[in-house]
Amino acid sequence: MAKAIIIRAPGGPEAMVLEEFDPGQPGPGQTLIRHEAVGVNFIDVYHRTGLYPLPLPFTPGSEGAGEVLAVGPGVTNVKVGDRVAYGTSRGAYASERVIDAGTLVKLPDAISYETAAAMMLKGLTAQYLLRQTFPIKAGDTILVHAAAGGVGLILCQWGRALGATVIGTVGSQDKAKLASEAGAHHVIRYREENVAERVKAITGGKMCDVVYDGVGKDTFIASLDSLRPLGMMVSFGNASGPVDAFNVGVLAQKGSLFLTRPTLFTYASTPEKLAAMSKDLMDAMASGAVKIAVNARYPLADAAQAHRDLEARKTTGASVLIP
Ligand code: NDP
């Protein structure tokens, strides 16, 4: 019998309960897959707590990798036995699941299931942030918050490979070391240091061209203050809580700034876009520019502990669940 984490009411980590379930058979355009690894992401916490409300009950998780067990009518992009991965389809915290074939990407043999389960949501997010939302060019200066996190470590590596000067912020000394090793030219300890002042000193007053801010509430204003005139503020997450409502006139006062609040689900909204983004990511990995760090593994049954560690800022890089 297959197993899945089920959430029947929003709440703390204990709201996630492992239950036996029947994944069913794939319908038209769908496949049944067996997960070998499942990615843990901060969006799973937002779903669990109800910050991003979902119809109940539901199975959390949007990222996974495994083998195709069966295909429904009309599926042409994958076949039984293929190694596949995805990062935009909820229901991942399960040993098996039915999933739309259009959300799947075939995996080259060189990419392990664990790596794939850590790269599809986080790596594709880095892809659109660096290559589409604000396309990085050599000589740009970028600020990356939570630089030792899942998305953060990828942004540091890829940003540097694209020729940017990377300034990372981190919550501890250990994380500072990781961010530096991943490619951050400068690291700011944002719990102790004034971010905008440090950015000013590092850049000789020029400030940053873009800020990639997945921390949200605690960093929002410091991020705006770290930008040059006409700079781009990319607010893509809320690890510290959602950003407070603010007066858009602030963007004028701080230098005619641009602000966007993007999501992967928009950028990877069609199979064609998903395929192009995945190719770009896999090319970056194949060239050695980007390495995916899977730094914690938990049994699927311990999903609650994975969430506790993520929320307590104890994790670095990516965490995966093993069914
Ligand atoms: P991370 O591995 O980056 O974990 C979150 C990190 O945020 C922590 O390790 C911590 O690093 C930092 N942080 C700062 N303040 C807090 C706080 N109060 N509580 C918890 N953590 C805090 O997570 P992910 O890589 O999964 O995601 C990073 C961000 O990107 C999230 O906000 C996520 O929602 C967002 N995201 C957005 C996407 C989109 O398309 N919009 C897609 C994917 C992710 P430190 O200790 O160094 O401060």
Image: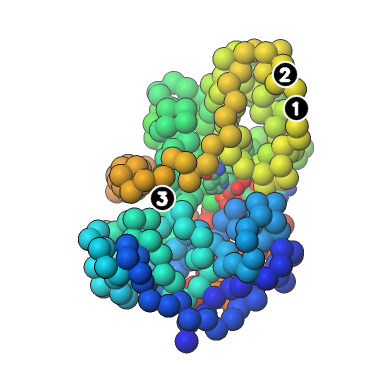
**Circle 2/circle 1 CB separation < 8 Å:** yes
Disc 1 beta carbon < 8 A from ligand 1? no
Please tell me which residue is depicted at 74% across the width and 64% down the height of the picture: 11
Please state which amino acid type lies under the numbered disc 3. Lys
Q: Is mark 2 on a helix, strand or loop?
A: helix
Whether residue 317 is visible here, answered yes or no, is yes
Q: Which mark is residue 250?
A: 2
The furthest residue to the bottom: 1
Q: Name the residue under label 3.
A: 291
Q: Relative to the observer, which residue lies in front, 317 or 96?
A: 96
* Label 3: how many Cα within 10 Å (few below 14, some 14–19, many 20+): some
SS at mark 3? loop
Between marks 1 and 3 in the image, the one whose residue lies nearer the viewer: 1
Query: Is 149 in front, or is 302?
Result: 302
* Direction from residue 258 to residue 254 in the image, left or right: right
- Cα–Cα gap, marks 1 and 3: 37 Å
Is residue 302 visible in the rendered image? The answer is no
The residue at the point 25 percent across, 63 percent down is 74
* Percent x, y of residue 57: 63, 69
Q: Percent position (x, y) of residue 144?
A: 57, 36
Q: Position of residue 221 (x, y in %)?
A: 72, 28
Q: In this view, does 68 lie above or below 310?
A: below
- What residue did someone put label 1 on? 246
* Whole-percent x, y for residue 278 in the image: 34, 47
- Within 10 angstroms of label 1, few (less than 14), some, or many (20 or more) residues? few
Q: From the Cβ of disc 3, is ligand 1 less than 8 Å away?
A: no
Dot 2 beta carbon under 8 Å from ligand 1? no
